[in-house]
Amino acid sequence: MKYNYDVIIIGSGPAGFSCAMQSSKFDKKVLVIEANEESFGGTWINSGTIPSKALRETARIIQRFQSQFEDLSHEKAYQHHKMEELLKYKNETLKSKNTKVENDFNKNEIDTVRGFGVLKDNNTVEVTAKDGSKKEYSGEFIFVSPGSKPLQPKGFKVDHDKVLDYTSVLNLNHIPRKILIIGSGVQALEYATTFSNLGSRVSILNETDSFLQFLDNEIRDQLTMILDKQKIEVFSNAENIEIQSNGLRNTTEVRYNLRNDNEGKRTRVIETEHVLYLGGKTPNTSGLGFENTGVELDEEGYIVVNSDYQTNVENIFAGGDAIGYPALASASFSEGRLASCRMFGIKALDVPPEIPFAIYSIPEISSIGLTEKEAKSRGYDVTVGRAYYKNITQGDISNQQDGLLKLVFETESLKLVGIHIIGERASDLIHLGQAVMSLGGDVRYFINHVLNYPTYSEAYRIAAFNGMNRVYKAGVKYKKLLKNNK
Ligand SMILES: Cc1cc2nc3c(=O)[nH]c(=O)nc-3n(C[C@H](O)[C@H](O)[C@H](O)COP(=O)(O)OP(=O)(O)OC[C@H]3O[C@@H](n4cnc5c(N)ncnc54)[C@H](O)[C@@H]3O)c2cc1C
């Protein structure tokens, strides 16, 4: 064998993990290099996807208990529960997930080495271990998936005590009475609703002019109503953010100006106990030796790849957060798998352009395809069908009446072009619509097929009837459509 390995993988997050697993299934000799001494899985298992969802799950259970048994729960969660106890569940989840990844590597005879990997040339990676010792490994192919890290904010510092980021928030030893989240994205909303359901007073300070603008308008309206109910305030258009501690009042003061403030440049102040900074991310690509290979990076340091996840160097592939959008664990799994298929010449379909996204707020939001506004602006003649959770039996049973499932479909063909959900189980529910949509189905699927009852999926049936009634009222021949369907 010319090289030590068929493929060397830098980083054991979802992209690296799935590339390793797929390559081993092709009977290839695989080495995974991981810089973290204690655990595999990167941001996915240790500081991002899984821990935030494990903490959220705890908050959700508390919220469900409180909404169902109000009489038993006069007190706020932070009066009942110690953060330490809540984090225990998260820690156990991480430990179990970590063991599973390690077992998968062992079972599939995937070699692993701990240390920081640096590309020395197109086929060689040098690994520096914690004790400073170095060793070189060669591979026919190299898959680079070093992930990303939090971007440092301008104007203030993350001290991991009063000002936290997504890594240090997981080490909080109490549930804060008040927390201010600085960020405008998905994770800001997720942590905001998690802490609100744990009993904290939560505000969001957002540096852009709107919050989650990409959501369908009606989903955003529902979200605004839900945030109001949870007493979460959102302050948009903030700039010149500074953070100071006020020793006298034992608080943290966040000062900022409003962009385009019609009251002049007035400084606004929010007092809080903790700040959670959830700004952007930056790829972990510095110091990886790309200059030794000629692999192209863009101006922000992201690795440039083609649709096969191949860099401009033929045998070097990359995936995950280090290649940029969509920077999700869900997409990273597909990227690693597909890169492996492309390396070893195995046929596999490209990732379809329409991928769903989920926001694990309480309640969840999930979406795929075009919003109503996008569809109309692209010239589609569309009709919408809505089902409010208050009209779904499962919503009543579970006391989860806040929510909306909205179908956007072509009026003439009834084919789905978008599905938008806010409400309990939205991130799972979306997949039924995704399957129908990707197989070219139309809204009649949800009327003609029997779905389990009671379930949240009933929302699809109600939304389909609601949409079909609107088509009928609009004058398109509903009866004819149903007749043709026989
Ligand atoms: C708070 C939060 C919540 C999130 N929630 C979700 C969610 O709900 N759903 C979702 O799909 N996505 C979610 N994400 C995004 C998801 O975590 C990332 O998209 C995903 O982990 C990226 O995978 P990756 O393989 O690129 O990198 P990572 O998971 O970051 O793994 C990279 C690994 O490479 C290692 N490494 C780096 N450099 C080297 C080197 N030179 N040598 C050796 N090893 C190296 C690192 O130690 C790390 O273990 C969330 C992220 C955050 C921060």
Image (tube, rainbow, N blue to C red):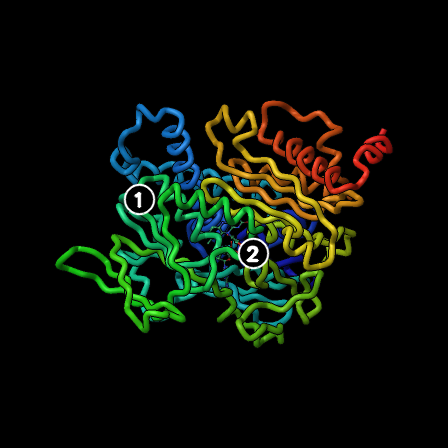
Residue drawn where x is 84% and y is 32% of the image: 485
Q: Residue 340: tell me if it is visible.
A: no
In the displayed structure, does residue 145 sit left or right of residue 444? Answer: left
* Label 2 Cα crowd, 10 Å radius (few <14 / some 14-19 / many 20+): few
Q: Residue 57: tell me if it is visible.
A: yes
x and y, in percent, of residue 414 in the image: 76, 42
- Which of 172/454 is in front? 454
Q: Find disc 1 in the rendering and name its residue.
A: 200
Q: Are marks 2 and 1 in contact (CB under 8 Å)?
A: no
x and y, in percent, of residue 235 in the image: 38, 58
Q: Quadrant of the N terminus?
A: bottom right
- Depth-wise, is mark 2 or mark 1 nearer the camera? 2
What type is the residue that disc 2 sits on? Answer: Phe
* Label 1 Cα crowd, 10 Å radius (few <14 / some 14-19 / many 20+): many
Residue 59: which quarter of the image?
top left
Residue at disc 1, secondary structure: loop
Residue drawn where x is 28% and y is 54% of the image: 274
* Some atom of ligand 1 lies within 8 Å of the CB belonging to the residue at label 1: no
Residue 309: which quarter of the image?
bottom right
In the displayed structure, does residue 323 sit left or right of residue 225? Answer: right
x and y, in percent, of residue 13 in the image: 53, 52
Residue drawn where x is 56% and y is 52% of the image: 215
